[in-house]
Image (spheres, coloured by chain):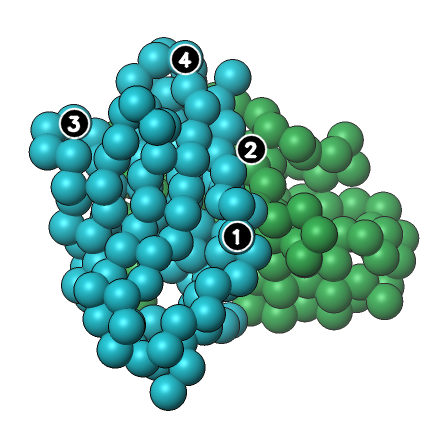
């Protein structure tokens, strides 16, 4: 079975500081990994994905994520946080050996303080 | 605008009633997914349709049902509603059944059962 964990319910960071939102996963095959962001009263928006290739993936709004196979992690990062980055972030995984549906993590609420 | 349209945006109804949520996928997408987002359960996969046929089932209650029509729009029917069914219901779409490009989400229908 596939699963995703986001160990932090809440992450607080000061504007201008680097941010990290953590994600670990469990799959039996090769993982397809995604990050989505949800702003208040909005649907989830795609940020970035890892399918294969370079372990460092760059996405929208200056976000990037690093795939680490040995640690089964896919942490989301941004070098300099903005107040407008405050939102709910979801990590999702699909096992290429297991159907076609993604499993989403519980979400991490990011608050960027001015 | 993501291209996935959900109606209505808000719905308030009484316990025991039945409601229908509607989703129009992004143009060209054949797969439709329904998710329920509640505060205590996170984002839960309910059901997937691909080109009119049910493809996968998640944590969908027997009181809930869905279908996808020939024009690819989908409806989620919720009956015998309970207070605990109050949640955000999201529809997402993707181009084909085993798509690696992730999902495009609608902005959701907020259901309040009173």
Measuring from the top left, give residue A76's x and y in whole percent: 31, 51
User: Which mark is nearer the camera, 1 or 3?
Assistant: 1
Please identify which colour was used for chain A in the image.
Answer: cyan
Name the secondary structure under disc 3.
Answer: loop
Name the secondary structure under disc 4.
Answer: loop
Measuring from the top left, give residue A102's x and y in whole percent: 43, 32
For the point 29% across and 18% down, the residue is A30
User: Looking at this view, is B89 or A65 the one in front?
Assistant: A65
The answer to whether residue B32 of the structure is visible from this angle is no
Name the secondary structure under disc 1.
Answer: loop
Q: Which residue is mark 1?
A: A8
User: Looking at this view, is B21 or A89 the one in front?
Assistant: A89
Relative side of A9 to A102, left or right: right
**Placement of the C terminus of chain B among the 4 image quadrants:** bottom right
For the point 49% across and 44% down, the residue is A6
Q: Pointer 4: residues within 10 angstroms few (<14), some, or many (20+)?
A: few
Q: Which residue is mark 4?
A: A28
The chain painted green is B
Q: Pointer 3: residues within 10 angstroms few (<14), some, or many (20+)?
A: few
User: Looking at this view, is B80 or A100 the one in front?
Assistant: A100
Q: Residue B47 shows which numbered tag?
A: 2
């Amino acid at each position: 079975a596939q699963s995703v964990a986001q160990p932090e319910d809440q992450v607080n960071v000061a504007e201008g500081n680097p941010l990290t939102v953590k994600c670990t996963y469990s799959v039996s095959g090769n993982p397809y990994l995604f990050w989505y962001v949800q702003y208040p009263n909005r649907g989830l928006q795609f940020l970035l994905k890892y399918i294969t290739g370079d372990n460092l993936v760059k996405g929208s709004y200056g976000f990037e994520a690093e795939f680490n196979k040995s640690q089964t992690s896919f942490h989301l990062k941004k070098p300099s946080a903005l107040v407008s980055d405050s939102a709910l972030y979801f990590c999702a995984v699909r096992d290429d050996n297991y159907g076609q549906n993604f499993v989403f993590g519980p979400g991490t609420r990011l608050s960027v303080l001015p | 605008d993501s291209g996935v349209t959900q109606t209505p945006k808000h719905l308030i109804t009484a316990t025991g009633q039945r409601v229908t949520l509607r989703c129009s996928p992004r143009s060209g997408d054949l797969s439709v997914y329904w998710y329920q987002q509640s505060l205590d359960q996170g984002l839960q996969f309910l059901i997937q349709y691909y080109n009119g046929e049910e493809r996968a089932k998640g944590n969908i209650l027997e009181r809930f049902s869905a279908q996808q029509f020939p024009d690819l729009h989908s409806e989620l029917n919720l009956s015998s509603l309970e207070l605990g069914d109050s949640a955000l219901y999201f529809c997402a779409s993707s181009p084909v059944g085993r798509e690696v490009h992730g999902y495009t989400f609608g902005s959701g229908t907020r259901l309040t059962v009173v």
